[in-house]
Amino acid sequence: MPVMMLAVLGNAGIKALHTTGDANEMFDGYVNRIFRSRSGWNEVLRWFVSLALICNLVVSVLNALGGASRGLLQASIDGVLPHAFQRTNKHGAPAAGIIFSMVLSTLFLTVGSPVQIYIISNMG
């Protein structure tokens, strides 16, 4: 759980919002509590927060793919993993590690909820 959500909503507020497991429901409650706006600006603020969350998730995915693939490459060079993970593309990026990480990430996305994905992407 993001620390700011816990600080703003409190444990009871999070339990009250977390009925369906929908991340949008939780972040709507977070935005409403922070801005306490009942006017038309609430919709604009929701779009702004949603856009910021999407950008955060994209950066998290890029960091996870880059870090994991480099780690797989180094483990292969050290002899811990199979030699196949040493394959790189013409730019020197670890192609086999990137493909392996993408396959695992796609599998996780198909079985995980948005809240779980957000928490794991921020915890590492």
Image (spheres, grey):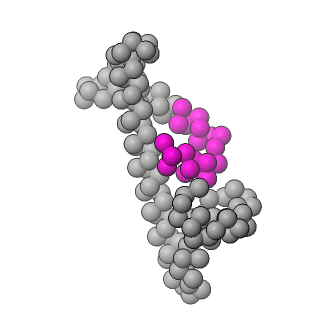
User: From this viewpoint, is residue 59 visible?
Assistant: yes
Residue drawn 40% across and 49% down? Answer: 59
Measuring from the top left, give residue 90's x and y in whole percent. 25, 25
Q: Residue at x 47, y 52 (%)?
A: 57
Note whether 113 is above or below 20 in the view shown. above
Answer whether residue 95 is visible to the viewer in this image. no
When asked about the image quadrant of residue 8, the answer is: bottom right
Would you say residue 4 sits in the magenta stretch? no
> Majority secondary structure of the magenta segment?
helix
**Image position of 77 with respect to 19: above or below:** above
Is residue 18 toward the left or the right of residue 60 in the image?
A: right
Q: Residue furthest left?
A: 91
Tell me which corner region of the image, top left, top right, bottom left or bottom right, holds residue 120: top right
Direction from residue 32 to residue 95 in the image, left or right:
left
Q: Residue at x 56, y 67 (%)?
A: 7
Q: Which residues are magenta?
A: 104-124
Most foreground residue, 38 or 90:
38
- Asked which quadrant contains residue 22, the reply is bottom right
Residue 98 drawn at (x, y percent): 41, 30
Q: Nearer the viewer, residue 43 or 118?
A: 118
Q: Give percent across and percent down for residue 87.
A: 34, 19
- Name the image quarter holding the N terminus: bottom right
Say above or below: 87 vs 50.
above
